[in-house]
């Protein structure tokens, strides 16, 4: 079994999309913990709604590559439009931040809100 901490975010109907994403995540692993949801200002393209962000700790039998594929499928199911600009509005954004206690997303080091959310579930788990 593997543990992963995922960053989860949305600024299009965020309450519903984050809720639905967590339900779908439970189909690819066991959702062990969810951080608080924090509202943050958009990065890059600032003329859009604020984001709701959180971190989810899951246990899964999927390897990192398989989990990444499943996250993309969940994003697709929830209507993520990949034709939008990188920092544009999103129905849902799911990223592996930590996999088996190894930081795999460099945004962890540069985005204070992400580090705070991830640490809140990571250090409760260790």
Image (cartoon, rainbow, N blue to C red):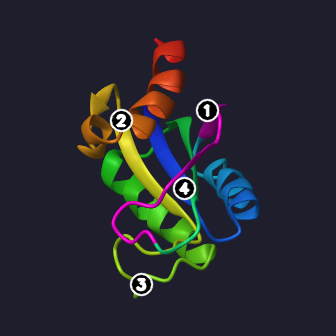
N-term-proximal mark, 1 vs 4: 4
Residue that badge 1 annotates: 35
Relative height, residue 103 to residue 6 (above, below): above
Q: Camera-side residue: 101 or 16?
A: 16
Q: CA distance from mark 3 to mark 2?
A: 26 Å
N-term-proximal mark, 1 vs 2: 1
Residue at the extreme bottom? 83
> Decide: marks 1, 3 in contact (CB < 8 A)?
no
Label at residue 9: 4
- Where residue 40 sits: x, y (%)? 53, 50
Q: Dot 2, crowdedness within 10 Å: few (<14), some or many (≥20)?
A: many
Relative height, residue 107 to residue 93 (above, below): above
Q: Camera-side residue: 63 or 86?
A: 86
Q: Quadrant of the N terminus?
A: top left
Which residue is painted at 68% across and 61% down in the image?
Answer: 14
Q: In what element is the residue under mark 3?
A: loop
Start and end of the magenta stretch?
Answer: 30-46
Q: Camera-side residue: 70 or 75?
A: 75
Q: Does the magenta-highlighted stretch encompass residue 44?
A: yes
Depth check, mark 1 against mark 2: the one in front is 1
Residue 1 in view in this figure: no
Name the quadrant containing residue 92: bottom right
Residue that badge 2 annotates: 98
Label at residue 91: none
> On the picture, is 19 further left or further right than 11?
right
């Amino acid at each position: 079994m593997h543990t992963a901490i995922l960053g989860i975010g949305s600024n299009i109907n965020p309450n519903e999309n984050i809720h639905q994403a967590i339900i779908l995540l439970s189909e690819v692993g066991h959702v062990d913990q969810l951080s608080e949801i924090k509202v943050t200002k958009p990065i890059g393209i600032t003329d859009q709604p604020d984001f709701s962000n959180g971190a989810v700790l899951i246990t899964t039998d999927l390897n990192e590559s398989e989990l990444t594929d499943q996250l993309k499928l969940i994003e697709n199911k929830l209507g993520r439009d990949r034709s939008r600009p990188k920092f544009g509005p999103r129905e849902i954004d799911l990223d592996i931040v930590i996999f088996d206690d190894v930081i795999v997303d460099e945004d962890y080091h540069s985005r204070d809100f992400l580090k705070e959310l991830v640490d809140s579930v990571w250090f409760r788990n260790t």
